[in-house]
Image (cartoon, rainbow, N blue to C red):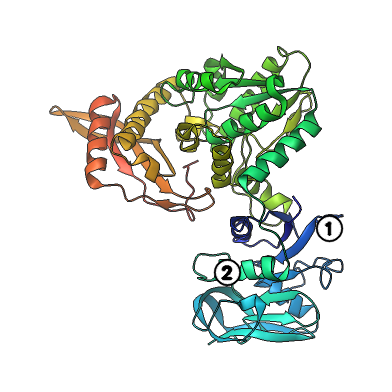
Amino acid sequence: MHNNVLILDFGSQYTQLIARRVRELNIYSEIKPYNKLPEDLSDYKAVILSGSPSSVRSEQAPHPDLSEIKGKKPLLGICYGAQYLSHFHGGNVAPSATREYGRANLSYVKQNEDFLSGIGEGSQVWMSHSDTIKELPEGAVCLASTHDVENAAYKIEGETTYGIQFHPEVYHTTDGKKLLENFLVNIAGLEQDWTPDAFVETTVEELQKEIGDEKVILGLSGGVDSSVAAMLLHKAIGDHLYCIFVNNGLLRKNEFESVLDQYKHMGLNVKGVDASARFLDALKGESDPEGKRKIIGRVFIEVFDDESHKVENAKWLAQGTIYPDRIESVSASGGPSAVIKSHHNVGGLPDYMKLKVVEPLKMLFKDEVRRVGASMDMPAEILGRHPFPGPGLGIRILGDITAEKVAILQEVDAIFIDGLKKWGLYDKVWQAGAMLLPVDSVGVMGDERTYEKCVALRAVESTDGMTADWVNLPYEFLQKTSNDIINKVKGVNRVVYDISSKPPATIEWE
């Protein structure tokens, strides 16, 4: 990666979107917390400062040392980043008379500026701040204004330093991608060479160098992430890769057998391990969502530890961890953003397990993983498969887990997913599944009163799981699916459909 962009995270909810927008330009970007600057900055050809919920006027304001960046590398401050560059370099930032939030339009654009090339007056931008720049930093000139924000964009003369008080990374800023392209390509001179093929080539070389002729164990799940990780490792080390597919008792109906069959034709060395009884026994009586995740993660590691002893001289454990997993679990690379939930495959291994961890996809978003898989000619059936959580149905059964509840949910899930495929809806949905609720409700079947379970169906549209909208499935489909579930699955007498988006809800219920 020769054209890296460093994104310093000040805690904005939009930081990950900046990374995605940069990568959409075929330029590699990395997020680092503002207080953990890399010691060696030579790999980064441009730097972007994110927004923040903080105020630069606060004594607790994030305050990194930019002495090796400002004036030495192309630098773009977004929202808080722009106010930071002003506040600490001779400008003045003060509270806004009214909170500047939402859509606005550029009312002034300085002509003949590469930074705003192709962006004219009237272009829509998205504001989200309560402070505003009253005076620009020393040596700066205004490049753009809106009706309410005089210094919407500026540059510092004699440097490739720019600041904007709006968010180019969000969908509502119509020319945001163009602005980022102007900065990174036209001004910083970065090449747009970060493609799936380039990623495969670079990653395979890095894996060969890191692993050498040592043996690697990989946990396959049948999903996109672990499958693509397996193919990258297979390209790098061939038969030194040992794949294990664990049945944790929380898989979809018949998934254990079908996944093993699926991999037969991919040239991977795969062993199936049925540990369902072990997982269900460990989960007995546990109803706390985080508790269940941790138990599943612990037993998963234990099973792998047992299996690793059967592979002589195994040195590595490979995982299909992707960037959103790490962001949600470890707070934007260890930075100030909020932790959402723990992931069973994030956070390293216990001391007793003497395997090193390798994560070939740890810096990729989900859509990037799919493109990398396609570049390796992987089957469309695997690449198009909906995401499925590592803890499986364990976090789709609210409350404690029993074998009976798993069996009920497997039948419900199968009817829902098979129905989506039959109706031609599966590929229009990013992720779908069913939740078994800890609720019994009254029903009537054959003139008899019932008191049985309620299930919730969930289907969302998304690109990478960071945000998601619920899918407006046809009423006829929902009616047919509800009828099939209630008629065919003993123990269920009520079906509801979840119409919440992320945020504020998450995709999974636990």
Disc 2 target residue:
178
Please determine whether, in this image, residue 275 is positioned above or below residue 160: above
In this view, 264 is above or below 183: above
Tell me the crowding category of disc 2: few under 14, some 14 to 19, or many 20 or more residues within 10 angstroms, Cα based: some
Q: Nearer the viewer, mark 2 or mark 1?
A: 2
On screen, residue 229 above or below 315? below
Residue 362 shows up from this direction? no
- Where does the image place residue 354, in percent across and percent down from the top left? 79, 23
Q: Is 51 in front, or is 400?
A: 51
The image position of residue 256, as x and y in percent, is 48, 20
- Residue type of the residue flagged with mark 2: Lys
Side of 194 where 210 appears, left or right:
right
Q: Is residue 78 visible?
A: yes
Q: How many marks?
A: 2
Q: Looking at the rendering, which quadrant does residue 402 occupy? A: top left
Q: Tell me: residue 79, above or below residue 492.
A: below
Q: Which residue is mark 1?
A: 41
Left or right for 88, reference 473: right
Secondary element under disc 1, as helix, strand or loop, is: loop
Q: Residue at x 61, y 43 (%)?
A: 325
Q: Quadrant of residue 212?
A: top right
Q: Position of residue 85 (x, y in %)?
A: 75, 76
Q: Nearer the viewer, residue 14 or 115?
A: 115
Residue type pointed to by label 1:
Leu
Indicate which disc residue 66 carries: none
Helix, strand or loop under label 2: helix
How far across and down, in percent of the image, does residue 237 sit? 72, 26
